[in-house]
Image (cartoon, rainbow, N blue to C red):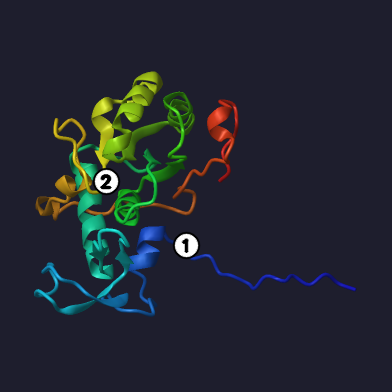
């Protein structure tokens, strides 16, 4: 009896992930796609106490993003990463952070810039983190303020420029040495175009659960 696959055929589009989410012509939902909530503070899209559609909501702080906010902010961040930090297509950005409301927006900004995201276990020690930084050839790292000490130690061990630490989350670095991602959503870079990517470019370099403990462990792609 011939073998029959239990998986449905899936067409993989020849486009990058950012474009697939935000720019494709056959997108079945509008920019205001999301869940209706009551936002108590005014946003760029609404007046105070107006019901709006949001895509992401933080259960603890109630901070939220609509689809169009995520699109606009990730675009602005991507342009700043290219213009201010000189990011180029194929650069790797490591994420060392627990789940946070800002993560998808910042990741999409990195993808807009034509770069590759490499998530790391937020429980890694500085030495384990340094191994992934070196193995992935990361040129920057995204984290949160409580993890700065570990990140700075890992960066020194891995030889990554310490100025390439970007924060997300609710707290900022008072010293200003590690900028917050919201400080890099400058609209003055409106003329910067999205870098071209092709089918061979990686969106993510994802490591197995043991990769941080074995310096010679290959990543799963």
Picture residue at 14% right of the left edge, 72% below the top: 45
Q: Which residue is mark 2?
A: 168
Distance from disc 2 to disc 1, alpha carbons, whole Å, reads 31 Å
Q: Which residue is mark 1?
A: 14
Q: Position of residue 204 (x, y in %)?
A: 46, 47
Q: Quadrant of residue 145?
A: top left
State the residue in front, 179 or 220.
179
Q: Earlier in the sequence, mark 2 or mark 1?
A: 1
Picture residue at 37% right of the left edge, 66% below the top: 21
Q: Is residue 59 above or below residue 172?
A: below
Q: Position of residue 197 (x, y in %)?
A: 39, 52
Element at label 1: loop
Q: Position of residue 125 (x, y in %)?
A: 45, 28
Element at label 2: loop
Picture residue at 90% right of the left edge, 73% below the top: 1
The local crowd at label 1, few if under 14, some if 14 to 19, many if 20 or more residues have their Cα within 10 Å, is few
State the residue in front, 134 or 209.
209
Q: Quadrant of residue 41?
A: bottom left
Picture residue at 21% right of the left edge, 62% below the top: 72
Q: Is residue 124 left or right of residue 220?
A: left
Nearer the observer: mark 2 or 1; the answer is: 2
State the residue in front, 68 or 16.
68
| Whether label 2 touches label 1, CB < 8 Å | no
- Residue 33 visible in rendering: no
- Residue 36 visible in rendering: yes
Q: Position of residue 120 (x, y in %)?
A: 45, 40
**Count of residue discs:** 2
The local crowd at label 2, few if under 14, some if 14 to 19, many if 20 or more residues have their Cα within 10 Å, is many
Residue furthest to the right: 1
Disc sitting over residue 29 in the figure: none
């Amino acid at each position: 009896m011939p073998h029959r696959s239990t998986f449905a055929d899936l067409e993989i589009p020849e486009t990058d992930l950012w474009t697939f989410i935000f720019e494709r012509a056959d997108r079945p939902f509008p920019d205001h796609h999301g869940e209706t909530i009551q936002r108590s503070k005014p946003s760029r899209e609404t007046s105070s106490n107006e019901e709006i559609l949001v895509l992401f909501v933080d259960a603890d702080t109630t901070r939220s993003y609509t689809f169009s906010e995520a699109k606009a902010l990730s675009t602005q961040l991507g342009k700043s990463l290219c213009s201010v930090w000189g990011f180029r297509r194929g650069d790797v950005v490591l994420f060392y952070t627990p789940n946070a409301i800002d993560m998808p927006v910042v990741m999409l900004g990195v993808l807009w810039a034509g770069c590759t995201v490499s998530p790391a276990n937020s429980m890694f020690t500085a030495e384990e983190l340094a191994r992934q930084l070196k193995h992935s050839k990361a040129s920057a790292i995204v984290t949160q303020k409580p993890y700065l000490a570990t990140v700075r130690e890992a960066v020194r061990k891995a030889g990554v420029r310490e100025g390439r630490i970007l924060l997300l989350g609710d707290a900022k670095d008072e010293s200003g040495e590690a900028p917050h991602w919201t400080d890099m959503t400058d609209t003055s870079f409106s003329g910067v175009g999205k870098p071209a990517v092709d089918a061979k470019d990686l969106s993510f370099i994802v490591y197995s659960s043991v990769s941080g403990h074995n310096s010679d462990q290959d990543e799963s792609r």
